[in-house]
Image (cartoon, helix red, strand yellow):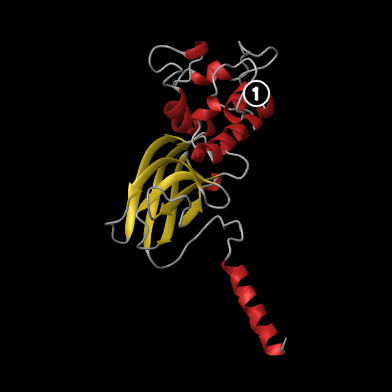
Amino acid sequence: MSKNIIITLLGVLALGLTACDDGRIYPDTDTSSEGKTVVLEGTLEGLENWAGNYRVSIAGFEEADDEYAQVSKVITASDVKDGKVSVELSGIKSEVKLVRLCVLDRLRRHIVTFKETDISDAKETVKMEVGTVDISMFNAIQQNFFNTTCANCHGASNRAAAGLYLTEGKSYDALVDVDSRKLEDKKLVETNNAANSVLHMVLNELTVPGISMAHHDLVSEKNEETILPLIDNWINNGAKEN
């Protein structure tokens, strides 16, 4: 094989590797002097209890169902002054239609949303006032999983399957460090031990001895990838309420 052909093949290979998803971790802040700017203001309760690879952020998305944010800025404790937050996200391109107060992972994948605003018709600067928002890990789970997937059988219709209420205001006390009625020597949520918690078992395993219903079948593919790891992270980091 000639030297020129070898050089050409190496160049093509290099371009191919560059085009692949390298799984890189995005920086905490994306800013630019060009594009729109959104200033988020409000009181965020539970900011300090997020752990692991999660980032409470102000982030921009082209479409509502986009899996990854196009632009984002992490909200940290240093952004809190007198209990309130004021964070500016600049350099938002015209393609971005929605800006969200949300949680992303380190690859900037969307996990949950707390508030959002449509900026598709906005000009240069938008003020996003969110008021007081409970952004704790537990409330994220309550709003995005218990309310939507579990509560219908566990308390929303005035009947709670297995006597377990997963509705707002009742779910935390019903789960954390509570003995299971079905599995001996197990707790529904064992603080700091997700793998030994009944909640983890029924959501992640196809069958659990002693549990008649296959709860795993109720978990959507998206929730399996995003919410179930979030639940485990919450348990392993102390299962805090707020």
Q: Is residue 174 left or right of residue 121?
A: right
Residue 181 percent across, percent down from the top left:
61, 10
Q: Is residue 42 left or right of residue 14?
A: left
Residue 64 percent across, percent down from the top left:
38, 48
Q: Which residue lies at the image location 51% right of the left edge and 14% below the top edge?
A: 164
Q: Which of the pair 92/65 is nearer the observer? A: 65
Q: Which quarter of the figure has residue 19?
A: bottom right
Residue 205 percent across, percent down from the top left:
62, 28
Q: How many marks?
A: 1
Instruction: Bin the neighbour count of mark 1 within 10 Å (Cα to Cα): few under 14, some 14-19, many 20 and up.
Output: many
Q: Quadrant of the N terminus?
A: bottom right
Q: Which residue lies at the image location 67% right of the left edge and 86% below the top edge?
A: 5
Q: Secondary structure at mark 1?
A: loop
Q: Which quarter of the figure has residue 185?
A: top right
| In this view, 147 is above or below 165 | below
Q: Which residue lies at the image location 46% right of the left edge and 53% below the top edge?
A: 69
| In this view, 117 is above or below 93 | above
Q: Which of the pair 119/112 is nearer the observer? A: 112
Residue 242 percent across, percent down from the top left:
53, 29
| In this view, 205 is above or below 99 | above
Q: Is residue 65 left or right of residue 53?
A: left
Q: Which of the pair 151/177 is nearer the observer? A: 151
Q: Amino acid at mark 1?
A: Ser
Q: Which quarter of the figure has residue 28?
A: bottom right
**Residue where numbered disc 1 is placed:** 197
Q: Which of the pair 44/19 is nearer the observer? A: 19
Q: Is residue 1 left or right of residue 211?
A: right
